[in-house]
């Protein structure tokens, strides 16, 4: 059984967190522009830094809109994660923004991905290569997306799927996410759709039990931490030196 790559969420503009994570063995950073406090200019800088240190960068865009998707990819991100997809129709429209024609309808901007060149040094081979290099992962976090998961996984513009566990649990009527049997069943349904269509699977793993399921289901990558949690745990560890516990 192949072990999944370890990934972490980045909620704040902190390149030191990226460097430390890379040093200890993380392979992927998910730059969170939906729930984190990271703007476009900061994302541009973070992506460039991650490219330099060999850390794969995925951007969870603030919303699955053309402008936000194109900006993240023009910054040079290795992929985008598209949140709050309602159903197949929504996924088909949004994921097309992540791929150049004829596969999709991503707009053309001359930036980092093109080595800051203009028309004379970009050819058709570039666009085909960029469509292969960058990945588009559809987030499954609504009942409609889960119901359409097989068809979403089959889209040519979709390279992988990632579960949004808290939103999916809440909208499915289970309340806050606790990795219940129902949550595990949803994880397996998404994993099965990925296997059926040869797409990458990304899963969150808030516990060893969730990580074991992700590994057993063949996840390509698993998010196991974030910069804010790591910082809190580090400060809490420091309190132990003084014989105190976190309040």
Image: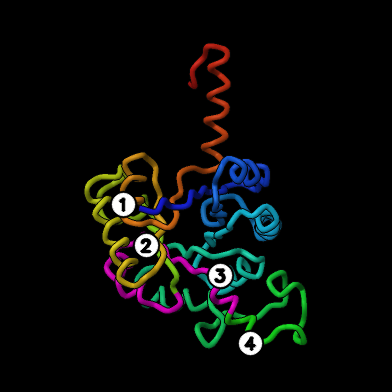
Q: CA distance from mark 2 to mark 1?
A: 19 Å
Q: CA distance from mark 3 to mark 1?
A: 26 Å
The reply, left or right, for residue 142 in relation to residue 55 is: left
Q: Which mark is residue 216?
A: 1
The answer to which quarter of the image holds residue 47 is bottom right
Pointer 1: residues within 10 angstroms few (<14), some, or many (20+)? some
Which numbered disc, 3 or 1, marks the residue that appears first in the sequence? 3
Query: Which one is closest to the eye, mark 4 or mark 1?
Result: 1
Q: Residue at x 55, y 44 (%)?
A: 25
Q: Residue at x 49, y 17 (%)?
A: 245
Q: CA distance from mark 3 to mark 4?
A: 16 Å
Q: Which mark is residue 140?
A: 2
Q: CA distance from mark 2 to mark 4?
A: 32 Å
Q: Residue at x 39, y 42 (%)?
A: 206
Q: Which mark is residue 68?
A: none
- Is 142 contained in the magenta span? yes
Which numbered disc, 2 or 3, marks the residue that appears first in the sequence? 3
Q: Position of residue 161 (x, y in %)?
A: 40, 64
The residue that mark 4 highlights is: 124
Contact between marks 3 and 4 (CB within 8 A): the answer is no
């Amino acid at each position: 059984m192949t072990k999944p790559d370890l990934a972490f969420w980045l909620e704040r503009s902190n390149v030191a967190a990226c460097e430390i994570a890379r040093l200890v063995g993380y392979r992927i950073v998910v730059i969170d522009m939906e729930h984190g406090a990271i703007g476009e200019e900061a994302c541009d800088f973070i992506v460039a830094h991650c490219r330099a240190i060999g850390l794969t960068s995925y951007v969870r865009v603030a919303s699955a809109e053309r402008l936000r998707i194109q900006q993240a990819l023009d910054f040079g991100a290795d992929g985008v994660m598209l949140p709050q997809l309602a159903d197949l129709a929504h996924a088909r429209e949004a994921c097309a923004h992540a791929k150049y024609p004829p596969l999709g309808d991503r707009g053309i901007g001359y930036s980092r991905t093109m080595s800051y060149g203009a028309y004379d040094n970009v050819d058709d081979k570039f666009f085909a290569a960029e469509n292969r290099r960058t990945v588009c992962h559809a987030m499954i976090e609504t009942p409609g997306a889960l119901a359409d998961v097989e068809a979403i996984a089959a889209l040519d513009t979709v390279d992988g799927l990632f579960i949004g566990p808290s939103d999916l649990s809440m909208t499915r009527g289970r309340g806050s996410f606790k990795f219940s049997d129902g949550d595990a069943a949803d994880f397996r349904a998404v994993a099965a759709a990925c296997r059926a269509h040869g797409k990458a699977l990304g899963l969150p793993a808030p516990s060893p039990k969730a990580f074991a399921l992700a590994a057993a289901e063949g996840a390509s990558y698993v998010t196991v931490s974030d910069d804010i949690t790591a910082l809190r745990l580090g400060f809490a560890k420091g309190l132990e030196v003084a014989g105190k516990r976190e309040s």
